[in-house]
Image (cartoon, rainbow, N blue to C red):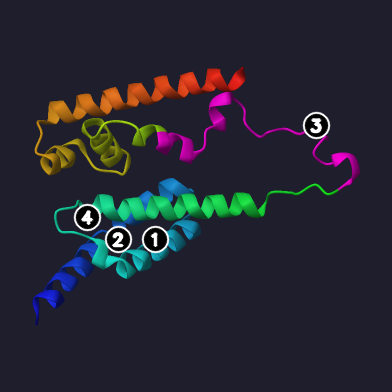
Amino acid sequence: MTTLDNSTKGFEDKLIDLQNNMMNFALTLTSNREEAKDLLQETTLRALDNKEKYYENVNFKGWVFTIMHNIFVNNYRRVVRSQTMIDQTENLYHLNMPQDSGFDTPEGAYTVAEIVKVINNFSDEYKVPFSMHVSGFKYEEIAQQLKLPIGTVKSRIFFARKRLQELLADYKYQDRE
């Protein structure tokens, strides 16, 4: 075997070993077993199609979970776009009808894109551990991967979560004005 075959085999082994974790993450995103299976399959195929873009020094689980999250968000946006109604009636009859937004609270109006945008504005020292934690990594795994004390990891995740809440609260009040 050539070294390329060995690295490809290692990549595929890692992907197979990660299938249970991927299914759990897919279930948290979709809350539906069949949709989670579809998401798992699509993520696996996308990872295999893009294996040349993976570098050994990058966290494999985080890389795959990011692919899954992006596929989920893109599929969600596609569904929303397909359900968008274009009102071509005279006087915009349908748009002017009173409608329930479906959100019980203003906090329910946040989109995943808005939350991700806020997180991406964090410095790497907070963004990386917080994103890994949200992706399903345990504190110990994050500490080991980032070569940081576990207390530092926990405090950075805490402060990132607190800052996210503050920034989204500010966004909510700006949106109301």
Secondary element at tag 3: loop
Tell me whether the residue at label 2 lies in contact with that at label 1, contact meaning CB atoms closer than 8 angstroms.
yes
Report if residue 109 lies within the magenta region.
yes
Residue at the image point whose x is 58% and y is 23% from the top:
175
Secondary element at tag 2: helix
Tell me whether the residue at label 1 lies in contact with that at label 3, contact meaning CB atoms closer than 8 angstroms.
no
The answer for how far apart the CA atoms under marks 2 and 1 are is 8 Å
Q: Does any portion of residue 93 appear in the rendered image?
A: no
Q: Which residue is mark 4?
A: 60
The answer for how far apart the CA atoms under marks 1 and 3 are is 39 Å
Give the amino acid type for the residue marked by disc 1 in the picture. Answer: Leu
Q: Position of residue 78 (x, y in %)?
A: 57, 54
First to last magenta residue range: 89-117
3 or 2: tag closer to the N-terminus: 2
Which mark is in front, 4 or 2? 4
Secondary element at tag 1: helix
Q: Which residue is mark 2?
A: 19
Q: Which mark is residue 98?
A: 3
Give the amino acid type for the residue marked by disc 2 in the picture. Answer: Gln
Q: Which residue is mark 1?
A: 40
4 or 2: tag closer to the N-terminus: 2
* In the image, farthest residue toward the bottom: 1
